[in-house]
Image: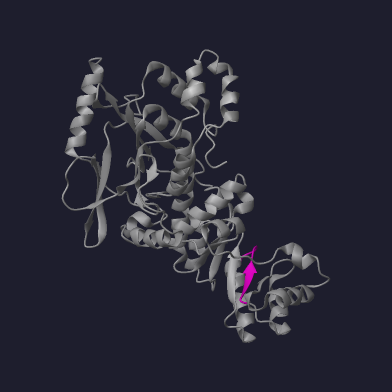
Amino acid sequence: MRGGALSTDLYELTMMAGYHAAGLMAPATFELYVRNLPPNRAYLVAAGLEQALQYLEHVRFTKEDIEYLRHVPAFSRVRDEFFDDYLPAFRFSGEVWAVEEGTPVFPPEPLLRVTAPLPEAQLAETALLAHVAFQTSVASRAARMVDVAAGRTVVEFGARRAHGIEAGVLAARAAFLAGCHSTSNVEAGRRFDIPVSGTMAHSWVTAFPDERTAFRAFADVFGDRTVILLDTYDTLAAARTVAASGLRPSAVRLDSGDVVMLSKQVRGILDAAGLHETDIFVSGDLDEWRIAEIVAAGAPVGGFGVGAALSTSSDAPSLGAIYKLVEIERSGSPVPIAKLSPGKQTHPGRKQVWRTFHGGTAGEDVIGLADESRPGGRELLTRVMVRGTRARAPRPLAELRDRCRSWLAELPGAVRRIDVPASYPVRLSAALQALIEETSRTASRGG
């Protein structure tokens, strides 16, 4: 269920009950960000904001939810007012600032900033992390694959490898946002207006007595949209069958073997039969490094189908995003909050991020306090929700995709390369540095 309030960690709910009992209902601000980049990556692509906002808009406690919580042992001492009055009326009433989906971002820049009464902001943690971290991880990897494909089509093929049906749908969304051409996931196509693509399986070929019959039967149904799978038995023999059959498929697919060598041989067979317009499409355990190898080898391949590497973000399946309290209102005044744990320190105060440019290329990001005045540069966080209501209508995914590609093109080429990428400079403003030092001193004095 999209707004399921119980789709969270128990401690979010126990803290809500505790805040309610302690009277801690004043506004608080949390920020969601990534502390460290995964190996071999130098940037991330923000994604998942739309699902995060949907959650905040629709989160409710049903009668069934409340009845269940009454009988959870952890809540045995919680007063009835929490169940009878607070939870039935619960709605998210806060403000959200966020980075636009498709924006390249870097640690430790906030992707999302939530200000709301403390229990509301606390409850959001699990869902926001799940939505934003997962799609950001997939989008970040998809962007790398689209880059190295160098203009060739990349299709998201990972529904069957995803960690659940809904994960597959959202992975397809994130991959399209970052530049993939289409998806094999039909539900993602319907829900997000993403072009859908598909070919045939080996089972189609083996269901017929021979390949010629299988190919003809498929072409009879799908005409000029036919994509023929060649590697069920013998790839080159299948290519010769296509060439001699009089069929004119839009593409043929290679799913195994030495696809660089085979693609060149298949191209020769097709061209000799006048099938110059029939493209060659490659799939089978692809990732950005394998795609780069195929492109560098000059293989006559027009497109790639990528499965598990996208839908599971297999090289970094857990992004390690965090959601931390950075400010709370006490006695009517905002108080900056920081965690000082070794290796897990957080930065206090509400923040904004500015991106500066040199000749059209991004040169540096500055993380500062939200109320700082910084002339020039692009502000990355914008207000997307006010008093629990969206500040604007959702942008079409195709529009976000176009923006993503243009924003990625602004990054230095050395930052975008897949092997030993260069680090992009991110620094803290002087005002934020001063607040960090003051907050640390105050904490060390015990008040």
Q: Quadrant of residue 150?
A: bottom left
Name the spot of residue 92 as percent of width and height, x first. Answer: 42, 36
Residue occupying the point 47% across, 56% down? 142
Residue occupying the point 52% across, 29% down? 9
Residue 261 lies left or right of residue 356; in this view the side is: right
Q: Is residue 106 above or below residue 235?
A: above
Q: Is residue 303 above or below residue 96?
A: below
Residue 58 lies left or right of residue 435; in this view the side is: right
Does residue 35 show up? no
Q: Is residue 212 magenta?
A: no
Q: Is residue 42 above or below residue 396?
A: above
Q: Nearer the viewer, residue 256 or 103?
A: 103
Q: Nearer the viewer, residue 323 or 328?
A: 328
Residue 266 lies left or right of residue 170; in this view the side is: right
Look at the image and name its color scheme: one colour
The total of numbered circles placed on residues is 0
Q: What's drawn in magenta, residue-wise?
A: 250-258
Name the spot of residue 85 as percent of width and height, x first. Answer: 48, 23
Does residue 330 show up? yes
Name the spot of residue 122 as percent of width and height, x first. Answer: 42, 29
